[in-house]
Image (cartoon, helix red, strand yellow):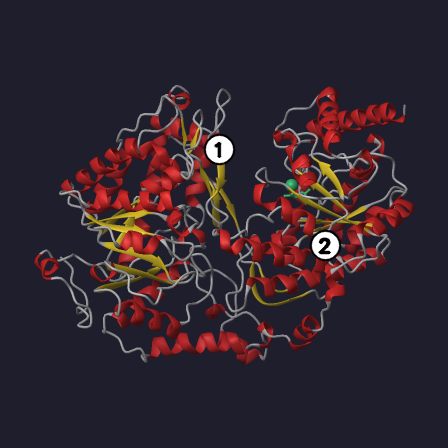
């Protein structure tokens, strides 16, 4: 049994607890990344999918990476290691397999368990995959459990036991991590049952599911497991009183088991608020709280003092070095409230890159020597560096290290250095922001703009357009790779992109599309492309983070005040415009999408950073306008992604997000037409905000939801023009003219023809030309037919 640190004398501990002492730990993380420091697992899985690897080869890569991760954590001084987190695709899908809830269609879809697992994750020619959606407010996506009348929960612990036995054999102090039953069900959906009022997701299944968790806990106890971690991030979201009650019942029941390991319930991604007293009142042994996004309330929480409080003081989802004083202070306060405190991350490290090693960044000392100012290596902490921080903080917490030890002093100096750097506090920019007025955020009334734009643009009824990107052809990708490798000069690369733009414009003219785009061939990614050109933004070399399955992204880092040193897209748009007489749409990424796909500053409010990014985009809009571009589209596909998890925070977000968009777009003349684009199917809570953006035209994904968004928007008083996507670009299928006509007719029931635009659901970059051309042909034909009909 591990005993670290002395019991806090200020806390009164019941005598009976002293009779059954807890085994405690002092330093851990809530979870780890798994794709591999060089994305080894990603590549191994993809090789397996292509048939180039056997299952055994794939498993050996995974096993080696797992062992390496465990060993690193132990070497760093952690005394409890999260295991069972090394998923081959997704931890929610792993839980679905664990509780025997894989839908029947996948059991029949493949020969082996591994292929059934991947069938559920990705689908096969015969069966579609499980639905995928975003994991709380992160950019990680999980597979949504789907239940039907035939779902009967049964325990399938094979994978979990394999993982556990490997850890035990390696002498790892393993703490298996499992998604808790409450969160698992709340995120699940019922295929053929209506939801129970007051209970989200599939919570009404709890009675059927709990026995499986009980059996699992008994099994783990028999296997000699000391601690199990049950993840309950749903506890930080807004819960109904019926849900809170249920949450309490779950842990009363699991905690009441006679034979079980000690239970750590992990909550993260926010403040546990009203779920905290509920969980603290149950007989669980430990509670992990997010001290980055939340805090302990001042009032007494009955039950808390008897538990191991796992304090998430190191940010698990952002990339900044921890401010040591703040963390120590939080630990001190936590120690006054609980008998034992362990140092941890706020959430799993799944959401940050592996390590800063290999990144090309000057140190503070190198900056000083060269007399430059800017991002310094020490400001940042990726996974490995965060583990080292935890180790240091745990030593301080255990009283083994003085809070004024040299390492702690260094950490302190780093925080001060970052705060003091001019790049995080640009006086000229700050002055500009302070001087912003109402007028900077508002354009003249839409009705007035609409008249001016009609005269300026002279477009036909039901104008046709596309969302921006055209297929990223093999030629484009190879030119980009050769340019990055230095095999093409910048002139040669630009020339290749110009040829691509010529082709795309010729194609759109041949198709007789009304408002053209340049096709975005020069953009690797809609966020990174701009991030690389903005001051205050840094793009890492190897900072990969899992987005879903084997898909990884490399979010750029906003480290300082964001400024636009020069125009970013004007040359390309102006060149494209010069090739045609038709209106050319300029293409930009909006402030909210820029931030939601980046690592953001933690030293100022997100809305303050949004204002800076918005100003950079505003200046770009004005430059596009000056270059003769009369239509500018500012994409906000990620508008919904930053929506807060708790209801009471949503209105404030909606307000500043819409304001940032308006700031970005209100600098142009009323005759210049602003478009925006959004593409997620669950608009629900966002419908009201879309009107607040005050774009002249909004294109939205809608082909898969029968144009519902059009009537939803109208009902919410939306009065600008709208371009509901008339066909689904996520499918390789070419739509028939009749389908598109039917979609347009449907839209016309909700919106007058004068305010309707015609466009696909989203950009075309993931499609092949063979699919795009006939699809766009059908779109234009359907539009012309409808125009003729309306003219009669
Ligand atoms: N303009 C972008 C494109 O067409 C929009 C992408 C998006 O909506 N995600 O690719
Ligand atoms: Zn889109």
- What residue is disc 1 on? 131
Q: Quadrant of residue 533?
A: bottom right
Q: Is residue 290 visible?
A: yes
Report the residue at 80% width, 56% height from top.
Answer: 624
Q: Secondary structure at mark 1?
A: loop
**Would you say the beta carbon of the disc 1 residue lies within 8 angstroms of ligand 2?**
no
Q: Earlier in the sequence, mark 1 or mark 2?
A: 1
Report the residue at 74% width, 40% height from top.
Answer: 722
Of 363 and 642, nearer the camera is 642
Of 327 and 69, nearer the camera is 327
Residue 114 spot, x, y in % from top left? 36, 29
Residue 645 spot, x, y in % from top left? 48, 51
Of 538 and 594, nearer the camera is 594
Residue 364 spot, x, y in % from top left? 50, 75
Report the residue at 88% width, 42% height from top.
Answer: 580
Residue 248 spot, x, y in % from top left? 29, 47
Question: Relative to residue 94, is residue 787 drawn left or right?
Answer: right
Tell me how many marks there are.
2
Q: Secondary structure at mark 2?
A: helix
Mark 1 Cα shell of 10 Å, populated few (<14), some (14-19), many (≥20) = some
Q: Is residue 275 above or below residue 102?
A: below
Which quadrant: the N terminus?
bottom left
Q: Is residue 574 above or below residue 744?
A: below
Which quadrant: the C terminus?
top right
Verify CB contact (< 8 Å) between mark 1 and mark 2.
Answer: no
Question: Relative to residue 672, is residue 370 drawn left or right?
Answer: left
Q: Is residue 72 visible?
A: no
- What residue is disc 2 on? 490
**Residue 349: which numbered mark, if any?**
none
Q: Quadrant of residue 185?
A: top left
């Amino acid at each position: 049994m591990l005993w670290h640190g002395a019991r806090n004398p200020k806390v009164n501990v019941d005598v009976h607890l002293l009779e059954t002492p807890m085994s405690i730990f002092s330093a851990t993380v809530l979870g780890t990344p798994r794709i591999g420091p060089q994305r080894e697992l990603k590549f191994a899985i993809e090789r397996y999918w292509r048939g180039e690897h056997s299952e055994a080869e794939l498993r050996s890569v995974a096993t080696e990476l797992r062992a390496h991760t465990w060993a690193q954590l132990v070497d760093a001084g952690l005394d409890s290691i999260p295991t069972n987190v090394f998923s081959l695709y997704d931890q929610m899908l792993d839980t679905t397999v664990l509780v025997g809830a894989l839908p029947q269609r996948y059991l029949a879809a493949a020969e082996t368990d591994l292929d059934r697992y991947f069938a559920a994750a990705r689908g096969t020619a015969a069966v579609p995959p499980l639905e995928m959606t975003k994991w709380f407010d992160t950019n990680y996506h999980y597979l949504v459990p789907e239940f039907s009348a035939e779902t009967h929960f049964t325990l399938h612990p094979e994978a979990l036991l394999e993982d556990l036995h490997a850890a035990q054999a390696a002498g790892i102090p393993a703490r298996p991590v499992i998604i808790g039953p409450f969160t698992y069900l709340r995120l699940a959906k019922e295929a053929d049952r209506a939801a129970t009022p007051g209970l989200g997701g599939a919570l009404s299944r709890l009675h059927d599911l709990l026995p499986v968790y009980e059996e699992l806990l008994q099994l783990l106890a028999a296997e000699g497991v000391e601690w199990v971690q049950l993840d309950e991030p749903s506890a930080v979201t807004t819960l109904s009183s019926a849900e809170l009650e249920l949450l309490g019942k779950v842990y009363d029941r699991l905690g009441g088991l006679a034979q079980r390991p000690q239970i750590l319930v992990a909550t993260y991604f926010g403040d546990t608020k009203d779920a905290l007293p509920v969980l603290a009142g149950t007989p669980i042994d430990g509670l992990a709280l997010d001290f980055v996004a939340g805090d302990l309330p001042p009032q007494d929480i009955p039950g808390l003092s008897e538990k191991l409080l796992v304090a998430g003081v190191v940010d698990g989802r952002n990339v900044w070095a921890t401010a040591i004083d703040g963390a120590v202070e939080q630990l001190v306060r936590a120690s006054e409230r609980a008998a034992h405190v362990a140092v941890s991350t706020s959430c799993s490290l799944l959401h940050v890159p592996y390590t800063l090693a290999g990144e090309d960044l000057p140190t503070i000392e190198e900056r000083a020597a060269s007399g430059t100012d800017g991002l310094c290596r020490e400001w940042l902490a990726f996974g490995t560096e965060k583990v080292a921080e935890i180790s240091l903080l745990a030593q301080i917490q255990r009283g083994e290290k003085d809070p004024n030890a040299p390492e702690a002093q260094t950490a302190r100096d780093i925080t001060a250095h970052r705060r003091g750097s001019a790049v995080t506090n640009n006086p000229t920019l700050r002055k500009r922001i302070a001087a912003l007025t109402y007028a900077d955020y508002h354009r003249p009334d839409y009705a007035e703009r609409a008249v001016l734009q009609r005269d300026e643009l002279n477009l036909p009824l039901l104008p046709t357009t596309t969302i921006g990107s055209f297929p990223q052809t093999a030629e484009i990708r190879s030119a980009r790779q050769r340019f990055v490798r230095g095999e093409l000069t910048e002139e040669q690369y630009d020339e290749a992109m110009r040829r691509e733009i010529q082709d795309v414009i010729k194609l759109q003219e041949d198709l007789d599309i009304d408002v053209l785009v340049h096709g975005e061939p020069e953009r690797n990614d809609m966020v990174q492309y701009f991030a690389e050109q903005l001051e205050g933004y840094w793009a890492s070399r190897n900072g990969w983070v899992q987005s879903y399955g084997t898909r990884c992204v490399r979010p750029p880092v906003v480290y300082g005040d964001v400024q636009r040193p020069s125009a970013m897209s004007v040359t390309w748009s102006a060149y494209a415009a010069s090739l045609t007489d038709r209106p050319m749409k300029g293409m930009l990424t909006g402030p909210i999408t820029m931030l939601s796909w980046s690592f953001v500053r933690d030293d100022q409010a997100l809305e303050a950073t949004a204002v800076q990014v918005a100003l950079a985009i505003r200046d770009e809009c004005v430059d596009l306008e000056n270059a003769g571009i009369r239509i500018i589209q500012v994409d906000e596909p990620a508008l919904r992604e930053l929506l807060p998890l708790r209801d009471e925070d949503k209105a404030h977000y909606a307000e500043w997000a819409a304001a940032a968009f308006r700031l970005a777009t209100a600098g142009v003349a009323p005759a210049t037409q602003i478009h925006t684009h959004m593409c997620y199917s669950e608009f629900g809570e966002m419908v009201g905000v879309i009107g607040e953006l005050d774009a002249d035209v909004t294109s939205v994904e809608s082909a898969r939801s029968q144009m519902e968004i059009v009537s939803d928007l109208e009902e919410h008083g939306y009065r600008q023009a709208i371009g509901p996507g008339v066909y689904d670009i996520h499918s390789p299928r070419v739509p028939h003219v009749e389908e598109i006509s039917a979609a347009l007719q449907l839209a016309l029931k909700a919106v007058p023809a004068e305010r309707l635009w015609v466009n696909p659901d989203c950009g075309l970059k993931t499609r092949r030309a063979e699919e795009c051309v006939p699809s766009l042909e059908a779109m234009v034909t359907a539009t012309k037919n409808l125009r003729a009909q309306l003219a009669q």
